[in-house]
Amino acid sequence: MQPTFPPYDLHPVMPHELAQPPYLASDDRARLDFSVVHAFLSTCYWSPGIPRYLVEKAAANSVAFGVYDLSAAAPVQVGYARVVTDYATFAYLADVFVLESHRGRGLSMLLMRCIQSHPDLQGLRRWLLMTRDAHGVYARCGFYPLANPGAAMEITRREIYLKGADAR
Ligand SMILES: CC(C)(COP(=O)(O)OP(=O)(O)OC[C@H]1O[C@@H](n2cnc3c(N)ncnc32)[C@H](O)[C@@H]1OP(=O)(O)O)[C@@H](O)C(=O)NCCC(=O)NCCS
């Protein structure tokens, strides 16, 4: 008889990490620096004005990844991405950034390799993402334009955080 809930292994104790010295990509939530993540996401083109509590709530309910510069005495967060997923069939990649002073060093590739090799994100039927102008980054990682854009629909409230709309 099939078990009602097949065995699965989510949130392993060991963090999933990839090193590219002096940088480290990691899913360790304890490393996240939300002052860095919020400073970027509240001023970028896709989530202007987003309040910090929503940045933290979104990370808490996603698989969140950071990129860290380990060359200083204390690690400094320089990149971020998160994956919204059911861990079984689908994942949505969101909020990808590398701070400007660390761009051009392959860190988005390090981040994407860390994400795509994550043990909880294997065997999914579909990955989605939205980007204004970074298609080339994701094309290097196997993403391609929607095969059937007419099949996709959305509800997007672009200025929700700027208009003082109640986001809760
Ligand atoms: C897009 C972004 C994450 C790239 O980070 P990065 O660490 O500088 O990228 P990398 O150094 O890993 O570049 C990897 C490759 O992608 C290319 N690339 C980098 N940014 C690119 C872009 N915006 N469009 C197309 N190709 C790009 C690089 O030329 C490099 O190619 P190469 O391997 O042939 O040399 C970074 O520029 C960023 O944070 N931008 C602002 C936020 C943003 O737009 N995020 C994406 C939202 S979907």
Image: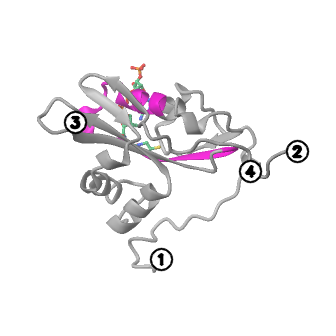
Marks 1/2 in contact by CB < 8 Å: the verdict is no
Residue 77 visible to the viewer: yes
Is label 3 in a helix, a strand or a loop?
helix
Marks 4/3 in contact by CB < 8 Å: the verdict is no
Q: Is residue 59 shown above or below 163?
A: above
Q: Is residue 105 magenta?
A: yes
The span shown in magenta is: 88-114
Q: Is residue 14 shown above or below 168?
A: above
Q: Which residue is mark 2?
A: 1
- Mark 4 and mark 1: span between their CA atoms? 32 Å
Towards the viewer: 160 or 75: 75
Q: Earlier in the sequence, mark 1 or mark 2?
A: 2
Which residue is at a point 75% across and 49% down the rendered structure image? 150
Mark 2 or 3: in front is 2
Q: Position of residue 37 (x, y in %)?
A: 31, 52
Q: Is mark 4 within 8 Å of ligand 1?
A: no
Is label 4 in a helix, a strand or a loop?
loop
Q: Earlier in the sequence, mark 4 or mark 1?
A: 4
Q: Position of residue 168 (x, y in %)?
A: 48, 77
Outermost residue, front side: 1
Q: Which residue is mark 3?
A: 101
Q: Which residue is mark 4?
A: 5
Marks 2/4 in contact by CB < 8 Å: the verdict is no
Q: Position of residue 16 (x, y in %)?
A: 43, 34
Q: Amino acid at mark 3?
A: Ser
- Mark 1 and mark 2: span between their CA atoms? 43 Å
Residue 28: mark: none
Residue 168: mark: 1
